[in-house]
Image (tube, rainbow, N blue to C red):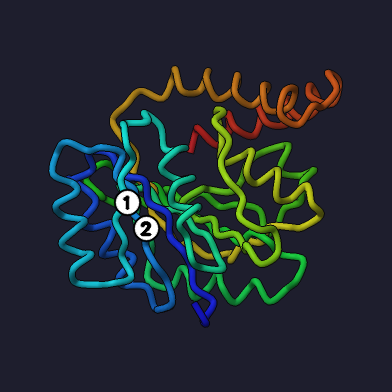
Amino acid sequence: MSKDYVSIITPCYNSIKFIDITIRSVLQQTYPFWEMIIIDDCSCDGSDVVIKEYCKKDSRIRYLKTDVPSGSPTLPRNLGIANAKGRYIAFLDSDDLWLPTKLEEQVRLFKDEKIAIVYSNYEKINEKGLRNNRQIIASVSISYKEILKENVIGCLTAVYDTKKVGKVYFEKVGHEDFVMWLSILKKGFIAKNTNTTTALYRLSNKSLSSNKLKAFSWTWNIYRKVEHLSFLKSCYYFGHYAIRTSLKYLK
Protein backbone atom coordinates (compact mmCIF):
# COMPACT_ATOMS: atom_id res chain seq x y z
CA MET A 1 0.00 0.00 0.00
CA SER A 2 1.62 3.25 -1.14
CA LYS A 3 -0.40 5.56 1.08
CA ASP A 4 -0.27 5.51 4.88
CA TYR A 5 -3.13 3.07 5.27
CA VAL A 6 -4.84 2.24 8.53
CA SER A 7 -5.70 -1.40 9.15
CA ILE A 8 -8.80 -1.58 11.34
CA ILE A 9 -9.03 -4.80 13.35
CA THR A 10 -12.57 -5.85 14.30
CA PRO A 11 -13.21 -9.16 16.09
CA CYS A 12 -16.79 -10.33 15.75
CA TYR A 13 -18.82 -12.96 17.57
CA ASN A 14 -22.61 -13.08 17.20
CA SER A 15 -22.83 -9.33 16.61
CA ILE A 16 -25.66 -9.22 14.11
CA LYS A 17 -27.44 -6.53 16.20
CA PHE A 18 -24.57 -4.05 15.83
CA ILE A 19 -22.09 -5.06 13.11
CA ASP A 20 -23.97 -3.18 10.40
CA ILE A 21 -23.81 0.21 12.15
CA THR A 22 -20.22 -0.44 13.21
CA ILE A 23 -19.16 -0.98 9.60
CA ARG A 24 -21.10 2.09 8.49
CA SER A 25 -19.23 4.22 11.02
CA VAL A 26 -15.99 3.18 9.30
CA LEU A 27 -17.39 3.84 5.82
CA GLN A 28 -18.18 7.38 6.97
CA GLN A 29 -14.54 8.15 7.82
CA THR A 30 -13.20 11.32 6.20
CA TYR A 31 -9.78 9.63 5.93
CA PRO A 32 -10.20 7.24 2.96
CA PHE A 33 -7.01 5.20 3.20
CA TRP A 34 -8.03 2.27 5.35
CA GLU A 35 -8.83 -1.42 5.28
CA MET A 36 -11.23 -3.04 7.71
CA ILE A 37 -10.40 -6.61 8.67
CA ILE A 38 -13.35 -8.29 10.37
CA ILE A 39 -12.46 -11.57 12.06
CA ASP A 40 -15.46 -13.81 12.64
CA ASP A 41 -14.94 -15.98 15.72
CA CYS A 42 -17.34 -18.66 14.40
CA SER A 43 -20.56 -16.67 14.82
CA CYS A 44 -23.82 -18.58 14.51
CA ASP A 45 -26.29 -15.68 14.25
CA GLY A 46 -25.80 -14.64 10.63
CA SER A 47 -23.19 -11.96 11.29
CA ASP A 48 -21.06 -13.44 8.50
CA VAL A 49 -23.81 -12.82 5.93
CA VAL A 50 -23.94 -9.11 6.78
CA ILE A 51 -20.14 -8.79 6.68
CA LYS A 52 -19.78 -10.60 3.34
CA GLU A 53 -22.38 -8.31 1.76
CA TYR A 54 -20.27 -5.31 2.71
CA CYS A 55 -17.16 -7.06 1.36
CA LYS A 56 -18.87 -7.29 -2.03
CA LYS A 57 -19.67 -3.56 -1.99
CA ASP A 58 -16.30 -2.25 -0.79
CA SER A 59 -12.97 -4.01 -1.39
CA ARG A 60 -11.46 -2.25 1.63
CA ILE A 61 -13.50 -4.55 3.88
CA ARG A 62 -12.02 -8.02 4.37
CA TYR A 63 -13.54 -11.10 6.03
CA LEU A 64 -11.52 -13.65 8.00
CA LYS A 65 -12.71 -16.48 10.20
CA THR A 66 -11.10 -18.41 13.04
CA ASP A 67 -10.92 -22.20 12.76
CA VAL A 68 -12.68 -22.71 16.09
CA PRO A 69 -14.39 -20.33 18.55
CA SER A 70 -11.65 -18.76 20.68
CA GLY A 71 -13.86 -17.38 23.43
CA SER A 72 -11.97 -14.07 23.61
CA PRO A 73 -10.95 -11.26 21.24
CA THR A 74 -7.22 -12.01 21.60
CA LEU A 75 -6.85 -14.66 18.88
CA PRO A 76 -9.13 -12.88 16.35
CA ARG A 77 -7.31 -9.59 16.90
CA ASN A 78 -3.91 -11.22 16.44
CA LEU A 79 -5.14 -12.94 13.28
CA GLY A 80 -6.20 -9.54 12.00
CA ILE A 81 -2.86 -7.95 12.87
CA ALA A 82 -1.00 -10.77 11.11
CA ASN A 83 -3.01 -10.11 7.93
CA ALA A 84 -2.89 -6.30 8.14
CA LYS A 85 -1.30 -4.44 5.23
CA GLY A 86 -1.45 -0.90 6.62
CA ARG A 87 1.21 1.17 8.34
CA TYR A 88 -1.14 1.93 11.22
CA ILE A 89 -3.10 -0.59 13.29
CA ALA A 90 -6.42 0.45 14.86
CA PHE A 91 -8.99 -1.45 16.90
CA LEU A 92 -12.78 -1.33 16.78
CA ASP A 93 -15.01 -3.92 18.41
CA SER A 94 -18.09 -5.07 16.55
CA ASP A 95 -20.57 -3.17 18.75
CA ASP A 96 -18.72 0.15 19.06
CA LEU A 97 -18.73 3.18 16.76
CA TRP A 98 -16.33 5.78 15.39
CA LEU A 99 -17.16 9.39 14.63
CA PRO A 100 -16.35 10.51 11.06
CA THR A 101 -13.12 12.46 11.58
CA LYS A 102 -11.42 9.95 13.91
CA LEU A 103 -8.73 8.59 11.61
CA GLU A 104 -8.06 11.92 9.93
CA GLU A 105 -7.42 13.56 13.30
CA GLN A 106 -5.17 10.75 14.47
CA VAL A 107 -2.96 10.05 11.47
CA ARG A 108 -1.66 13.61 11.31
CA LEU A 109 -0.24 13.36 14.85
CA PHE A 110 2.16 10.58 13.88
CA LYS A 111 4.42 13.14 12.18
CA ASP A 112 6.07 13.52 15.57
CA GLU A 113 8.73 10.78 15.71
CA LYS A 114 8.27 10.36 19.47
CA ILE A 115 4.59 9.39 19.11
CA ALA A 116 3.90 5.67 18.56
CA ILE A 117 0.27 5.55 19.77
CA VAL A 118 -2.51 8.04 19.18
CA TYR A 119 -5.72 7.76 21.15
CA SER A 120 -8.68 10.01 21.99
CA ASN A 121 -11.49 10.67 24.41
CA TYR A 122 -14.64 8.63 23.97
CA GLU A 123 -18.28 8.68 24.99
CA LYS A 124 -20.31 5.90 26.57
CA ILE A 125 -23.63 4.92 24.98
CA ASN A 126 -26.23 2.46 26.22
CA GLU A 127 -27.07 -0.81 24.49
CA LYS A 128 -29.65 0.97 22.32
CA GLY A 129 -27.04 3.46 21.15
CA LEU A 130 -28.38 6.46 23.05
CA ARG A 131 -25.81 9.12 23.97
CA ASN A 132 -26.06 10.86 27.32
CA ASN A 133 -22.82 12.87 27.42
CA ARG A 134 -20.96 10.34 29.58
CA GLN A 135 -17.54 11.23 28.22
CA ILE A 136 -14.25 9.68 29.27
CA ILE A 137 -11.61 12.41 29.07
CA ALA A 138 -8.09 10.99 28.94
CA SER A 139 -4.69 12.56 29.61
CA VAL A 140 -3.23 14.87 26.94
CA SER A 141 -0.27 12.49 26.52
CA ILE A 142 1.21 9.61 28.45
CA SER A 143 4.52 7.81 28.94
CA TYR A 144 5.36 4.32 30.19
CA LYS A 145 5.70 5.34 33.84
CA GLU A 146 2.46 7.34 33.75
CA ILE A 147 0.35 4.66 32.12
CA LEU A 148 1.42 2.22 34.84
CA LYS A 149 -0.71 4.33 37.19
CA GLU A 150 -3.80 4.10 34.97
CA ASN A 151 -4.58 2.77 31.52
CA VAL A 152 -6.13 5.88 29.98
CA ILE A 153 -6.10 4.51 26.43
CA GLY A 154 -9.46 3.16 25.33
CA CYS A 155 -8.81 0.29 22.92
CA LEU A 156 -11.53 1.49 20.53
CA THR A 157 -9.68 4.81 20.19
CA ALA A 158 -6.11 3.54 19.83
CA VAL A 159 -3.93 3.50 16.71
CA TYR A 160 -0.27 2.46 16.70
CA ASP A 161 2.46 2.99 14.10
CA THR A 162 4.12 -0.20 12.82
CA LYS A 163 6.80 1.85 11.03
CA LYS A 164 8.12 2.86 14.46
CA VAL A 165 7.47 -0.25 16.57
CA GLY A 166 6.75 -3.08 14.15
CA LYS A 167 3.70 -5.30 14.47
CA VAL A 168 2.81 -5.73 18.13
CA TYR A 169 0.48 -8.55 19.11
CA PHE A 170 -1.83 -9.12 22.06
CA GLU A 171 -0.78 -11.46 24.84
CA LYS A 172 -3.36 -13.84 26.27
CA VAL A 173 -3.67 -12.16 29.66
CA GLY A 174 -6.31 -10.07 31.37
CA HIS A 175 -6.17 -6.45 30.19
CA GLU A 176 -4.32 -7.49 27.04
CA ASP A 177 -4.68 -4.00 25.58
CA PHE A 178 -2.96 -2.48 28.63
CA VAL A 179 -0.07 -4.93 28.16
CA MET A 180 0.22 -3.91 24.51
CA TRP A 181 0.45 -0.20 25.32
CA LEU A 182 3.05 -0.91 28.01
CA SER A 183 5.19 -2.94 25.59
CA ILE A 184 5.17 -0.08 23.07
CA LEU A 185 5.74 2.79 25.48
CA LYS A 186 8.50 0.91 27.31
CA LYS A 187 10.60 1.45 24.17
CA GLY A 188 10.74 5.18 24.94
CA PHE A 189 7.82 6.38 22.83
CA ILE A 190 4.86 8.40 24.07
CA ALA A 191 1.14 8.16 23.37
CA LYS A 192 -0.78 11.28 22.34
CA ASN A 193 -4.42 12.23 22.74
CA THR A 194 -6.23 14.08 19.94
CA ASN A 195 -8.07 15.89 22.77
CA THR A 196 -11.34 15.27 20.98
CA THR A 197 -14.07 12.67 21.31
CA THR A 198 -13.82 10.33 18.32
CA ALA A 199 -15.55 7.11 19.39
CA LEU A 200 -18.64 5.72 21.10
CA TYR A 201 -18.30 2.83 23.53
CA ARG A 202 -21.40 0.67 23.92
CA LEU A 203 -22.21 -0.51 27.44
CA SER A 204 -23.81 -3.93 27.75
CA ASN A 205 -26.37 -5.00 30.31
CA LYS A 206 -23.89 -7.36 31.94
CA SER A 207 -23.05 -6.74 35.58
CA LEU A 208 -19.83 -4.82 36.11
CA SER A 209 -19.22 -5.78 39.75
CA SER A 210 -17.46 -9.09 39.09
CA ASN A 211 -15.53 -7.51 36.22
CA LYS A 212 -14.18 -4.85 38.58
CA LEU A 213 -12.72 -7.50 40.86
CA LYS A 214 -11.19 -9.29 37.88
CA ALA A 215 -9.73 -6.00 36.66
CA PHE A 216 -7.92 -5.42 39.94
CA SER A 217 -6.53 -8.96 39.89
CA TRP A 218 -5.43 -8.67 36.26
CA THR A 219 -3.67 -5.36 36.91
CA TRP A 220 -1.71 -6.73 39.86
CA ASN A 221 -0.71 -9.70 37.70
CA ILE A 222 0.58 -7.33 35.01
CA TYR A 223 2.74 -5.44 37.48
CA ARG A 224 4.25 -8.56 39.01
CA LYS A 225 4.32 -11.22 36.26
CA VAL A 226 4.37 -9.24 33.00
CA GLU A 227 6.32 -6.10 33.88
CA HIS A 228 8.23 -7.85 36.70
CA LEU A 229 8.05 -4.86 39.02
CA SER A 230 9.21 -5.21 42.60
CA PHE A 231 6.60 -5.69 45.30
CA LEU A 232 7.02 -2.10 46.54
CA LYS A 233 6.80 -0.60 43.05
CA SER A 234 3.77 -2.74 42.31
CA CYS A 235 2.08 -1.47 45.48
CA TYR A 236 2.89 2.12 44.51
CA TYR A 237 1.41 1.85 41.02
CA PHE A 238 -1.49 -0.31 42.17
CA GLY A 239 -2.47 2.35 44.71
CA HIS A 240 -2.67 4.97 41.96
CA TYR A 241 -4.56 2.55 39.72
CA ALA A 242 -7.11 1.59 42.40
CA ILE A 243 -7.99 5.18 43.28
CA ARG A 244 -8.20 6.42 39.68
CA THR A 245 -10.15 3.41 38.46
CA SER A 246 -12.66 3.63 41.30
CA LEU A 247 -13.30 7.28 40.46
CA LYS A 248 -13.68 6.46 36.75
CA TYR A 249 -16.32 3.78 37.41
CA LEU A 250 -18.45 6.45 39.08
CA LYS A 251 -18.74 8.42 35.83
Element on which disc 1 rests: strand
**Label annotation for residue 37:** 2
Q: Is residue 79 left or right of residue 243?
A: left
Question: Disc 2, disc 1: CB below 8 Å?
Answer: yes
Amino acid type of the residue tagged 1 in the rendering: Leu
**Badge nearest the viewer, 2 or 1:** 1
| Marks 2/1: CA–CA distance | 7 Å
| Circle 1 Cα neighbour tier, 10 Å, few/some/many (<14 / 14–19 / ≥20) | many
Q: Which residue is mark 1?
A: 64
Query: Left of 246 or right of it: where is 197?
Result: left
Q: Position of residue 59 (x, y in %)?
A: 28, 72
Q: Residue at x 41, y 42 (%)?
A: 76
Residue 71, by quadrant, is top left
- Residue 100: x and y, percent? 37, 71
Q: Quadrant of residue 247?
A: top right
Q: Earlier in the sequence, mark 2 or mark 1?
A: 2
Taking the spot 75% from the left edge, 71% from the top edge, the residue there is: 113
Q: Amino acid at mark 2?
A: Ile
Residue at x-position 50% and y-position 33%: 250
